[in-house]
Image: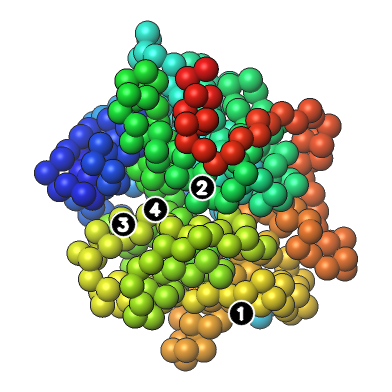
Amino acid sequence: MKFYSTNNPLYFVSFREAVFQSLPVDKGLYMPEQIPQLDRHFIDNLDTLSFEEIAFEIAQAFVEDDIPSHELRRIVEETIAFPAPVVDLKDGSHILELFHGPSLAFKDFGARFMSRVMAYFAEEGDRLLDVLVATSGDTGGAVALGFAGVPNTRVSILFPKGKVSSVQELQLCTNDANIRAIEIDGNFDDCQNLVKQAFNDVDLNHQLNLTSANSINISRLIPQTFYYFWAFSQLKKAGKERVIFSVPSGNFGNLTAGLIAQRMGLPVKHFVAATNTNDVVPRYLDGEDFQPLPAKATLSNAMDVGNPSNWSRITELFGGSRIEIAKAISAYRFSDKETQEAIASVYQQSGYICCPHTAVAWLAAQRYRDAVASDDTIVALSTAHPCKFPDVFSERIGKEVVTPNAVQALKMKSARKIEMDADYPGFRDFLLS
């Protein structure tokens, strides 16, 4: 399959080129030339298939012959080597837990798939691959673990100073020598802008072999479709087939993947975009112009994005029509106070502990249900393990959070980071040094 730029439908590249280039030269984002339509028999029988069988079928629909089947199957199996269960809460809610991977965040799916695809495509004698990634919390940890020790790669992870949790910072700063953690004196948008400027710097790209590990890279989105199908499979087994997903949204890659899954044939009834006070998209769907704003720091820090990159992919899917987007997506925003109240409410009603991002998604699910008086099955995506946000919880709830051994081990490692201003010339010099 070929992939085109959202800024130029006539600009096509191969899957390999799309993965390694990350961003087209015209500053758009890559999209598949067509959304593959999965066989009706496959869709109707999702409840009889394993996670691996489902994921392989989806991956092959995009990759086609660019990767041999036996190699793609290996990549898929290594990508989803951990569970993604739908959990039913006592209050009637449903949670899709996506935090059982090595970095305890949903981004393990994308990072593991991408790193293994890049390793497969890398040819002997290729220049050192410089992987750039901006993170507001969870992406960096997943990418670090996905690329740790991968030969001929060097990963630079940019994160905003003082705006990631203590556990997230440990995940960024305690890795192999090929992983470099860079603390930027600014917010996530500053980090993301530095990465984008690097990709748009023609001279720099002649000198370095750059690629991105953010959700702007199409190989991050493809595996994120896997778990929407897998969640539906689990729900179908329980006799629940009218499904709505509530997605905590920052850069909007996760929601984009869900919409692509729907276009592939997954019978999702509706999507709910759940944001914190970084509410560019809810404002847009309320009738305002799409106006990027400076990112605000919140408790749900992985969603602190003022200019979501993947929104251009979503508008592409709907032909730029706000009316059509609003038919498919409802959007709600919530404050830190509401987030903390939701964490307490879920715990009180069900004994379940939500991370702040999950709490925002749960809130949006309740808001949508109340707004439309729906009795459909609404699933809130849980994108991170609660142990990554120790400062968010009350003393009572905090005592109940079980910290995995992997996180305990991080505290015994030496942390390394490079401090830097949000200054492109300085960042450029660092990359070239």
Q: Can you identify the residue that label 2 sits on?
A: 190
Residue appearing at x 58%, y 75% in the figure = 334
Q: Position of residue 26 (x, y in %)?
A: 23, 41
* Mark closer to the observer (2, 3): 2
Could you tell me the amino acid type at mark 4?
Answer: Ser
Q: Can you identify the residue that label 3 sits on?
A: 312
Q: In terms of secondary structure, where does tag 4 sit?
A: loop
- Tell me how far mark 3 sits from mark 1, CA to CA: 35 Å
User: Is 103 drawn above or below residue 391 in the view shown?
Assistant: above
Q: Nearer the viewer, residue 426 or 298?
A: 426
User: Is 397 drawn above or below residue 3 in the view shown?
Assistant: below
- Tell me how far mark 1 sits from mark 2, CA to CA: 40 Å
Q: Can you identify the residue that label 1 sits on?
A: 92
Dot 3, crowdedness within 10 Å: few (<14), some or many (≥20)?
some
Image quarter of residue 386? bottom right
Q: Can you identify the residue that label 4 sits on?
A: 309
Q: In terms of secondary structure, where does tag 1 sit?
A: loop
Residue appearing at x 40%, y 27% in the figure = 210
Could you tell me the amino acid type at mark 3?
Answer: Ser
* Mark closer to the observer (3, 1): 3
